[in-house]
Image: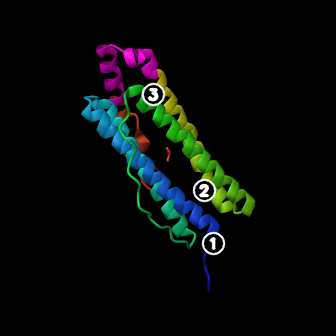
Amino acid sequence: MDTKRISATLEEALSTQMNVELFQSHTYLSYGIWATDKGYDGIGNFLMRHSLEERNHAIKFMQYVLNRGGKPTVSALKGAEGDPQNLTDCFNRVFKHEVENTEKIYNLVNMAFEEKDWATWNFLQWFVKEQIEEETLAMDLIDKLKIAGGDRATDESLFNLDKDLGKAEDDAELARNANSENP
Ligand code: OFO
């Protein structure tokens, strides 16, 4: 008896999204390494924790497809883009990645809607909300850096920004306690 409760189209699309989230994770890891190497340990720590969060998003997609009787496939991961040129470039890229990912999530929501697959539609609402938070987070990074003086920020402002983002770890319950149910 076929117990699969998801269409082949959505199974493939969600599997693809699992790989997109893995790529996001890969990207944030590479930015985290870049920032740490530049001496911004706090920002590096922040980005690396975000990398873990993205990985957990991938796990959430994986688990959902499996729960619906499907089987996701891990595809070859393309290499992360080159290093950012500076912190402004880094935070702008973070924002761009989040907006692009939001568009992908919206596309999946549309597909679920068209198929009247309400289970998948409902599952995806968690990601719709999450993307709002992540876009806000990325905008905040850009704003904080602007306030600190952007690319012309003094060493002291950058030092404080770095320290603040390093400390953000303590607020990041979701990142520290992440699992497939609560990424
Ligand atoms: Fe997976 O949330 Fe950002 O992209």
**With respect to residue 84, does 81 lie above or below?**
below
Front position among marks 3 and 2: 3
Label 3: state its secondary structure: helix
Q: Which residue is at 45% across, 58% downward? A: 59
Front position among marks 1 and 3: 3
Q: Is residue 77 left or right of residue 166?
A: right
User: Residue 61 placed where, x, y %?
Assistant: 51, 59
Amino acid type assigned to the residue bearing label 2 in the image: Phe
Q: Can residue 181 be seen in this view?
A: no
User: Residue 26 placed where, x, y %?
Assistant: 38, 49
User: Do residues under tags 2 and 1 come within 8 Å of each other at their CB atoms?
Assistant: no
Residue where numbered disc 1 is placed: 5
User: Residue 14 placed where, x, y %?
Assistant: 56, 60
Q: Is residue 36 visible?
A: yes
Residue where numbered disc 2 is placed: 123
Near-viewer residue (70 or 22):
22
User: Residue 174 placed where, x, y %?
Assistant: 43, 43
Residue 103 — which label? none
Magenta stretch secondary structure, dominant: helix
Q: Is residue 166 left or right of residue 107?
A: left
Amino acid type assigned to the residue bearing label 1 in the image: Arg
Q: Is residue 103 left or right of residue 81?
A: right
User: Start and end of the magenta stretch?
Assistant: 144-166
Near-viewer residue (181 or 144):
144
Label 1: state its secondary structure: loop
Near-viewer residue (97 or 140):
97
State how the image is colored: rainbow
Residue where numbered disc 3 is placed: 141
On whether residue 78 falls in the magenta region, the answer is no
User: Do residues under tags 1 and 3 come within 8 Å of each other at their CB atoms?
Assistant: no
